Structures are given as C-alpha cells and as structure tokens.
Image (tube, grey):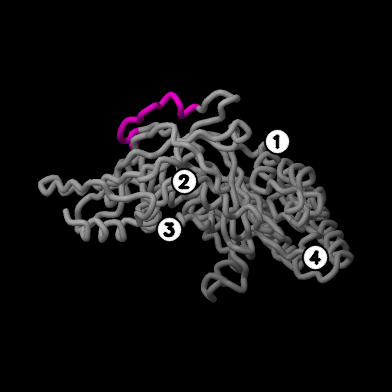
Amino acid sequence: MEMTDKHLLSQMLGIHEPWAIKSVKLDVPGRKLEVEVECRQDHWADEEGRRLPIHGYGMRSWRHLDAFEFETVITGRVPRVRYPARDAGAGKADRETGPDHEGGDDDDEDDDGGSAAGGRTMLVKVPWAEPHSRFTALFERFAVEVMGACRTVTEAARLLRISWDQAQRIMERAVARGLARRQDVVIPHIGIDEKSFGKGQDYATVVLDPARECVHDLGPGRTAEATVDLLERCLPDPEIRLQVSAAVMEMSAAFAAAVRQTLPSAVIVYDRFHVSKLLNTAVDQVRRAEHGRLSAGGDSRLKNIPCHWLTGPENLEPQKLEELKALFARNAVVARAWTDRENFASFWDCSTEEEAMAFFKVWERKVNRRKGLQPMKKVAATLRRHLGGLINYITHPLTNGLAEGINSLIAVLKGAARGLRNFSNFRVRVLFFLGKLDMLPAV
C-alpha cells in the first residue's frame, strides 16, 4: 500500500504522531480490514511533560467503525512505561479480562506494577480509545447511539456484530462516563420511590430528579440503611446534599429516616397521589364490606358495579356520572365514604399551613363521627401521623407523579429484557435509558 494510502487511513482512523500505520491487511473473503500501528519513539512524555523510558510493550487490538462495509480492527504494541515511585498509586494498570480481550501481552508481569522503590509500570493511553476498552472511541460513540435506539442489548449487539457481553460492557462504561460527568449537579429537590426488580421481595430504591425529569440513581433494598447508602453515593458532596431543599416520597418511615440523616436541609413532602391511592383503597374496602353484608341477606346490588367512584366527578362522562349517582342511591354508606374522599381533595388547595391544619381537623372529625367507615377512619389516623409531611406540600408543592411514569418505563425495560434479576445490570439499564446522562465518549 502506498504511503499516500496510509496517510489517508491515518486521517480516517485518527492516528497521528508519535503513532503511525505499520501495515494493512485486507481479508476480502472475510470482509475484514486490520490496521497495525506502531509507536515511533523510544521514550514517552506524560501529562506533566516528564520524559519516561519505555519499559516494554503490550499487544492490544480495538474494534473500529466499519470501513467500506469491512469490519475494521486496529492492532498495535502499546508502550509500557515506568512511573517514578511517588506516582506508584496514581492509577491502575491497563489490565483487561473477558471475551473481548484480543491479543496477547508482552511483559505482562509488569502490568501489576513494579516495586515501591522502582515505581509502577503502566500502558500509555492511546489517542483513539479510552483506557481498558477494546473498542475505539468512535465505535463506542456509535454503539451507545445504536443501543439507545434499540429495545434490547441483544438487538443492538446483533446490529453492531459484537457479543452480548461486549455490548453490556460498552453500556456499563457509558453509564460510568455519564455519572462521572454529573458529579457537581445541584438538585434542589428529589423524589424517592421503590421499584421491584426481581422475583418475590426484591426491591430497589429509586432517587428521582423532578427538575430534569429523570432517574438520578438507584440502589438495592428499601430499608433506611440502604437508602442512606444510596443518597450518600449519588450525592457524595456534603455541600451538594445541603442544597437539597425538599424530598417527596410515599409515607415510608425508612425513606423519611434516611432523608433526615443525610439531607439536613430537606423538608419531607408526602406524595399527594399516594394519599389519593390510600383513600381510593379505603372507599373500595367500604364497598366490599357493604357488599358482603348485603350479600348475606341475598342483596347483590353492589355486585359487578363499574369503578367510576375511583375517578373524580369532574372527569366523568355524563353517562358514567349517572351510573355513579345510581350507586350512591343504592347504598348511603359507600356514598359517605366517597364524599369524604372527594372532600379531602380541598386540602391541597389550602394556601397556608394554618389553613391546612384547620381543614384537616374538620375533615378528620367528620370521618370519625360516621358509622361503618372503619377503612376511612384508619386512613384518617395514618394521615394524622404524617400530617407534617402533608402540610409541607403547601410550601413545597411537589408530587411523585414522575415516579409513576418512570415505573412504567422501567417495566417496559424489564419486559424487553425478559426480566432483569441481576441488580447491577438492572441499574445500568435504567440509568442508560432514563438517567439523561452525557454518555458519549470524547473523540
């Protein structure tokens, strides 16, 4: 191949001094192009400009973007240099394992570092790929975009013509890259929710960023200790944690305790949609109890009725509203439970904490005076115990409505992957698709 052709390939592949193309092998039947590169100097200058002697070489290969529909691979002997003893702990050696590790190493015993007196040996960073990667930065950038457009890792791996393990590792590196770039992001308020990710009682705690409408991070478990670990990991800077002014959540003692321990400036806001769910469940329990009582006497008037009472009357069509009125005409107990649920909605319209407190006292007193409404009375007692977090909504009108949408998207990811029982893979998948991270490698 003429030098002009090598120069053209160098420009296409981003290879420049001190690197140069040594040879090119074209396998037409196998549709593969292999470009061998070499380092044309006998020493190396680090980021500080220090001249470091080359101690040995390690053979490496990187998959690149296809050229003219030929699978393109860059190979070369990467210099291994010895850093002074004071830099022995400055970094990790370039050691790779796994099915995408191609090629052997020269002087592999030096990858673990030399003695404390002699310093540590490390492979230098090549300009076309990130450390510890068997793919060029351009290929990884393309792969991240392809995986973002595909439903599954398997589908993306097929299109990229790489293995599932290789695609998974590209996704893991992309998420790690995005998290590293997001370290100093200030979150004025957060959402906390739980999500099942495996079989049985396998749960994850999800931290949401309502302002950016994305998942900030997630961790295994839903205990107070697990939530504390998660908050300290995803908000590692104490100064950043001090700037979180509010945390919206369901009425979980574990979540509340974790927030009080790790986010001292944050007020706890209990999610109004979770309150609505509790009230809806209580109304349904009243209806079921009444149906059981009436059925014992042969009365089936509450059997197989439409669940229009779960919807606010303002959102019902005229026909469904008439059906709801007919239900209440058949049973006053259910009507009273539904009325109490509807009346509580005015709590969220209060403009001051004093007004909200006064409203709740009146509402609670009416509920407790009614007969046959034990489920509603239990909910009233629950709301009384968490009244402070409910009243905080007045000054911090936040909801966890984002969590419902996120949970639906997570369910889609799990379904497409036919279940994600490994939490590490589950976390990577969620952050890749729902974390709004800056994941593309620099080129």
Dot 2 and dot 4 residues touching (CB under 8 Å): no
Res 291 seen here: no
Residue numbers of the magenta segment: 99-112
Q: Nearer the viewer, mark 2 or mark 4?
A: 2
State which tag comes first along the sequence, 2 or 1: 2
What amino acid does circle 1 point to? Glu
- Horizontal and vertical percent for residue 63? 31, 46
For the point 37% across and 32% down, the residue is 98
What amino acid does circle 2 point to? Arg
Res 239 seen here: yes
Given residues 178 and 81, the one toward you in this image is 81
Which is the main secondary structure of the residues drawn in magenta? loop
Mark 1 sits on what residue? 225
How far is mark 1 from mark 3, CA to CA? 41 Å
Q: Nearer the viewer, mark 3 or mark 4?
A: 3
Dot 2 and dot 3 residues touching (CB under 8 Å): no
- Secondary element under disc 1, as helix, strand or loop, is helix
How far is mark 2 from mark 3, CA to CA? 15 Å
Mark 4 sits on what residue? 395
Given residues 183 and 208, the one toward you in this image is 183
- Horizontal and vertical percent for residue 372? 74, 50
